[in-house]
Every structure is written in structure tokens, then in C-alpha cells.
Image (cartoon, rainbow, N blue to C red):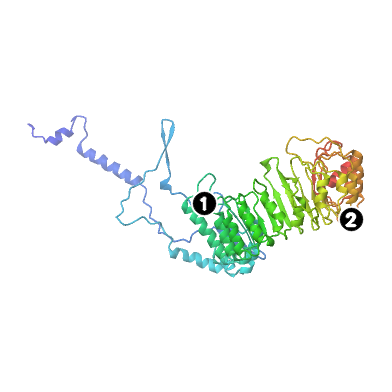
């Protein structure tokens, strides 16, 4: 400058008349600095980290004669909590909520090194372990006898089965593993299909895992298996049956339910290894009939129970049984699917009686037998002298008559259970002529799934209650149209019974039973615990329903009086 003033000074002073002096500006700056220092909070000292034992999830309280383990966690306490840094943040933009992921700091790591999860130091666990040992928390698990655990597991296995319960408890500790491996727990095994979700295909690795799992169980756990059941398997059924037959020398019962792909190979493995097998159940399964027929022809003499579902080719099984392939057979059950509709099965009763003279239980569930005669039939039969249960129940219309029933049980004095539900053409006179004198259960109700009505009135029900009044324990007369007089006489015979076995179940739904007859039978049947009076039009309103238990039936008796 021309006046000699420094350039920096001329720029800093804008208005010489209004600007404060340099001394006053410095004083004001020092004053503001002192005020800031005076108002500033003193810094807190960092506390030293103290190692604490991890929080226990339970508390042990001592009662009068036992130790109680009480959990400290509730529904709001969770052992695992998400990382706060990884949570999503909400950002508000012009009244709208926008979720944006939290920003992560990129941390550069040297090559060859990976992030490590924080581990609990041994020094932090030592106080907790020492506290456990002092209080004796772990002593109950170490000193508990294996026999006690085995008895506890046996109760659960009896209710829920061995698999997957024993497989899960074996992972708890060494003691539970030893108890779960006890052969006494692996007597009855039922394996359901739990590796494949519906609608998904099976991968090769999954199939290999299934095979390895079954093979390991068979070799290490199935040595004492008596009863084995396989349910809802679509693949590897032959492999499972083969492995089980090789590892289970004491196998007595085999059940394949809702399984597909059962070929002759499975039955061949059974014939070569399982000499104690006496029961086969293949109901609702798709099997190769020829393989099972060949097995029956070779080893059917050792079988005592056969259960199968009626199908297009399954009648060959009944033909093989009637030829005498299973002379020791005691139970024969043939059923069909409920949605299969009207199902008939041609059967020669005389040939079956000669082929299975020791039959005790004969059931045809929802299958209507059609009489069939063979060419090489001599005409002489010995009947079923040991038959104790006969079931011909169906939800469709059955054409069985009194003559057909007599051909089956004409020589069965030991018959105890007779199930004729749906057999509308059977009469009371035909039943009263049967040779069995100690019938305990008679099921003669009409239950039709289709729109079928039976309007023909019947008579003679008092003949049945008079003949079996001392032995009947369960009686089902649902929708049987006997007259009011017949029902009163029949209920009178039941009330005057003198047998040792009391009446326990009575189904009179849809019948013409009256109030006096009902009052008479209820008053004398003190052990009655099931009574069905639904749709009984001759009873007052409010009483036509199902009664369970003696208390409800006694209340009904009070209302009737």
C-alpha cells in the first residue's frame, strides 16, 4: 500500500469506525473459552472389566424330599439375541417409512486369516463349574442308575414308540446313550417316513443317508426286535425289509402300511432269515402279489396272522390260503379303502374252512363276500370249530342272508364277538338259531354311507335278548326298526339277567324304544357306562343324545323317574 499499512491488516478491517479494538477482541475470546471449560462435564474413568461367570438358566431349590430345578428364563428372555450392529434402521422420508440396511464397516483382513467367533475363556467357566460341583448339580445325572432310566424310557416307548424317541435321548449324554441302547427297549419299532417333504423328489445323497441310517439301526439296535412296522414309504422298502430280516433273527411280526414298491425280493429275504415270523400285515400297501403268494406256498405253515387289502389281484392270496398254504392260521383280516365304493369278493367258505381249521378271528371289513363254489369240491366241511370273532361289517348294502351266515358259523360254539353291521337281510330268527350260546358282543346296527333307507319293520328281537341275556356285554341295535312291544320285551330280558358279566354298552339310536322300557333296563344295569339314545322318536325331548359314564346315566334315570 501507499500509506505503508500491511495488506493483511487492510483486508481484516472493514469499517475502522465501528470495529472493536484488538485488545477487547482478545479479552472476549478468552472469556468464551473459560465459560466452555467451566460448563464441560468431567470425563468418566473407565471401569476395569470384571470376569463374571455366565448366567445360569435354572435355579436348584431343595424341597422336603427332592431337588427342584426351576427355570430362570421366560418367554421374554432368549439366550440368543441378534447383533445390534446388524439390525435394520428405519429412515423417514416425507411421511413414508423406508427400511434401509445398516451400514457395515469394511474391515480389511490379511490374506489367509478368517474372522473368529468370541470364545468363553476357561477362567470364566471355572467359577461356575466349581459352584456346580459344590452344590451337587451334576451328581444326580452321574449317580442315577441305568436301570431306572431304562424303566422310564420303557414307559415312553410303550406309549410313543422307540423311534424317534430313543434316537433323540441318546444324544443327551453318555448315560442316556447307554440307557437308550438297551435291547429291552427295542422290541417294538415303528418307522415313519420323515426324510422327504410332500411334493419333493428324493436326492441321491438323501437316499444314501436313508440307507445308511437304516443299516446302522438294524446292526446296532434291532438285534432283539420282535415287531417291526414301516409306514408311508415310497422308496427303499425292499432294502429296509432285507436289512431288518438279516439283523432281526427274533422277528415275529412285519407290518407294511401305505408303502409302495414292495417286490418279490422283500419276501425272499424274509423266507431266508426270519424263521420266527408268524404275522404279516400289508394293508393299504402296493405289493407284488406273486411274491407274497410264493412266500405263502413255501413258508405259509409258520404264519398265524395275515392282513391285507382287497385289490384287483389280491384274490389270489385268498385262493392260496384256501388251498391249505397256512394250516396254522388263526387271524385273517381283509379290508378295503373307504372310498373304493361297493366291493365284492368271491370266496368259497367251505374251502377256507378246510384250509384253515384253526381260524379264531375272521374279519371282512367293508368287503361283501360272494358265495363261490369250486369244481373239485367234495362237499364235506369241518367248519370253524375254534372261531371266536366274526366280522362282516360294511357301510354299503350287504346281501348276506341267514343261510350264508349259518354256513360260516354252523360249527362255531365258541363264538364270542359277532359284528353284522350293515347286514340288513339277517333276521332275528336266524341269529337265534346259531349254535353259540355264550355270545358277549353283538353289533347289528345299520350304518349306510349312501342314501339307502330300510323301511321294512322287523320282529323277534326278544329272542336274542332271551337267549344271550346272561352273557351279552355290548349290544348295538342302531336303526333297527323293531316294534315298541318287541323292544319292551327285549329290554325286560336284559333287566332280568342273572349272569356274572354285566351289560356295559347299549346302542339304541334310531330305534322305537319307549320310556318305560328304558327305565327298566337302566335301573337294573348298574355297570352300564355307554348309552346311545340319539334319534329315538319315542323318547321326550332333551333325552335323545349320547350318554357316557355311569354318572350321566344315573342322572338320566332320575329324569325318567
Q: Which mark is residue 189?
A: none
Location of residue 454 (image quadrant): top right
Which residue bears the numbered disc 2?
499
Against 400, residue 322 (above or below) is below
User: Residue 167 is drawn in which quadrant?
Assistant: bottom right
- Tell me if 245 is positioned left or right of 449 in this view: left
Rendering quarter of residue 191: bottom right
Nearest to the observer: residue 58 or residue 265: 265
In this orientation, which residue lies closer to the viewer: 340 or 438?
340
Residues packed near mark 2 inside 10 Å, few (<14), some (14 to 19) or many (20 plus): few
Is any atom of residue 62 visible in this view? no
Q: Please say whether residue 451 is visible from this viewpoint.
A: yes
Residue 389 lies left or right of residue 67; in this view the side is right
Q: Quadrant of the N terminus?
A: top left
Q: Find residue 95 and report its horizontal and vertical position in percent.
A: 43, 31
Q: Secondary structure at mark 2?
A: loop
Q: Secondary structure at mark 1?
A: loop
Residue 509 screen position, x and y as percent: 81, 41
Q: Position of residue 139 (x, y in %)?
A: 57, 68
Residue 18 horizontal/vertical position (percent): 21, 30
Whole-angstrom CA distance, mark 2 to mark 1, is: 64 Å
Extreme residue toward the left, this view: 2
Q: Are marks 2 and 1 in contact (CB under 8 Å)?
A: no
The C terminus lies in quadrant: top right
Q: Residues within 10 Å of mark 1 (few under 14, many from 20)?
A: few
Q: Residue at x 68, y 62 (%)?
A: 302
Is 176 left or right of 392, judged from the image as shown?
left
Q: Which residue is mark 1?
A: 78
Q: Between label 2 and label 1, give the one nearer the viewer.
A: 2
| Position of 439 relative to 427 (above/below) | below
Amino acid at each position: 500500500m501507499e500509506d505503508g499499512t500491511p495488506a493483511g491488516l487492510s483486508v481484516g478491517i472493514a469499517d475502522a469506525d465501528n470495529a472493536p479494538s484488538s485488545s477487547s477482541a482478545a479479552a472476549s475470546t478468552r472469556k468464551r473459552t473459560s465459560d466452555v471449560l467451566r460448563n464441560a462435564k468431567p470425563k468418566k474413568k473407565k471401569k476395569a472389566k470384571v470376569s463374571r461367570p455366565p448366567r445360569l438358566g435354572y435355579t436348584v431349590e431343595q424341597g422336603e424330599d427332592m431337588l427342584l430345578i426351576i427355570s430362570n428364563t421366560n418367554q421374554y428372555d432368549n439366550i440368543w439375541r441378534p447383533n445390534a450392529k446388524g439390525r435394520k434402521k428405519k429412515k423417514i422420508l416425507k411421511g413414508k417409512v423406508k427400511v434401509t440396511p445398516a451400514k457395515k464397516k469394511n474391515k480389511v483382513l490379511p490374506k489367509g486369516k478368517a474372522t473368529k467367533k468370541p470364545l468363553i475363556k476357561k477362567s470364566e467357566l471355572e467359577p461356575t463349574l466349581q459352584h456346580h460341583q459344590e452344590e451337587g448339580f451334576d451328581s444326580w445325572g452321574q449317580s442315577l442308575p441305568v436301570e431306572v432310566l431304562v424303566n422310564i424310557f420303557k414307559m415312553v416307548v410303550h406309549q410313543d414308540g422307540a423311534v424317534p424317541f430313543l434316537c433323540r435321548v441318546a444324544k443327551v449324554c453318555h448315560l442316556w446313550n447307554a440307557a437308550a441302547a438297551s435291547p429291552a427297549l427295542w422290541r417294538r419299532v415303528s418307522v415313519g417316513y420323515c426324510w422327504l417333504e410332500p411334493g419333493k423328489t428324493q436326492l441321491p445323497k438323501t437316499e444314501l443317508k436313508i440307507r445308511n441310517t437304516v443299516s446302522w439301526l438294524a446292526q446296532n439296535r434291532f438285534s432283539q426286535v420282535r415287531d417291526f412296522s414301516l409306514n408311508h414309504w415310497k422308496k427303499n422298502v425292499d432294502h429296509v425289509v432285507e436289512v431288518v430280516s438279516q439283523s432281526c433273527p427274533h422277528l415275529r411280526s412285519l407290518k407294511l402300511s401305505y408303502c409302495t414298491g414292495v417286490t418279490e425280493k422283500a419276501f425272499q429275504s424274509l423266507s431266508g432269515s426270519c424263521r420266527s415270523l408268524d404275522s404279516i400285515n400289508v394293508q393299504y400297501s402296493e405289493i407284488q402279489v406273486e411274491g407274497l403268494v410264493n412266500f405263502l406256498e413255501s413258508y405259509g405253515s409258520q404264519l398265524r396272522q395275515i392282513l391285507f387289502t382287497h385289490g384287483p389281484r389280491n384274490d389270489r392270496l385268498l385262493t392260496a390260503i384256501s388251498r391249505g398254504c397256512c394250516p396254522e392260521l388263526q387271524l385273517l383280516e381283509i379290508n378295503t379303502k373307504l372310498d373304493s365304493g361297493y366291493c365284492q369278493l368271491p370266496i368259497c367258505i367251505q374251502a377256507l374252512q378246510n384250509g384253515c381249521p384253526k381260524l379264531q378271528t375272521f374279519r371282512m371289513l367293508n368287503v361283501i363276500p360272494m358265495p363261490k363254489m369250486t369244481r373239485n369240491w367234495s362237499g364235506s366241511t369241518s367248519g370253524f370249530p375254534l372261531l371266536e370273532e366274526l366280522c362282516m361289517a360294511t357301510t354299503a348294502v350287504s346281501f348276506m342272508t341267514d343261510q350264508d351266515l349259518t354256513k360260516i358259523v354252523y360249527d362255531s360254539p365258541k363264538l364270542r364277538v359277532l359284528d353284522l353291521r350293515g347286514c340288513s337281510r339277517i333276521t332275528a330268527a336266524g341269529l337265534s338259531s346259531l349254535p353259540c350260546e355264550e355270545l358277549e358282543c353283538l353289533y347289528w346296527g345299520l350304518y349306510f354311507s349312501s342314501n339307502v333307507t330300510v323301511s321294512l319293520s322287523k320282529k323277534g328281537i326278544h329272542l336274542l335278548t332271551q337267549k344271550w341275556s346272561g352273557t351279552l356285554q355290548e349290544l348295538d341295535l342302531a336303526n333297527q326298526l323293531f316294534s315298541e312291544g318287541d323292544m319292551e320285551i327285549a329290554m325286560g330280558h336284559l333287566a332280568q339277567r342273572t349272569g356274572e358279566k354285566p351289560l356295559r354298552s347299549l346302542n339304541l339310536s334310531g330305534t322305537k324304544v319307549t320310556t318305560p322300557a328304558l327305565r327298566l333296563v337302566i335301573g337294573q344295569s348298574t355297570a352300564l357306562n355307554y348309552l346311545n339314545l340319539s334319534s329315538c322318536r319315542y323318547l321326550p325331548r332333551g333325552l335323545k343324545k349320547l350318554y357316557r359314564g355311569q354318572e350321566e346315566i344315573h342322572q338320566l334315570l332320575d329324569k325318567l323317574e
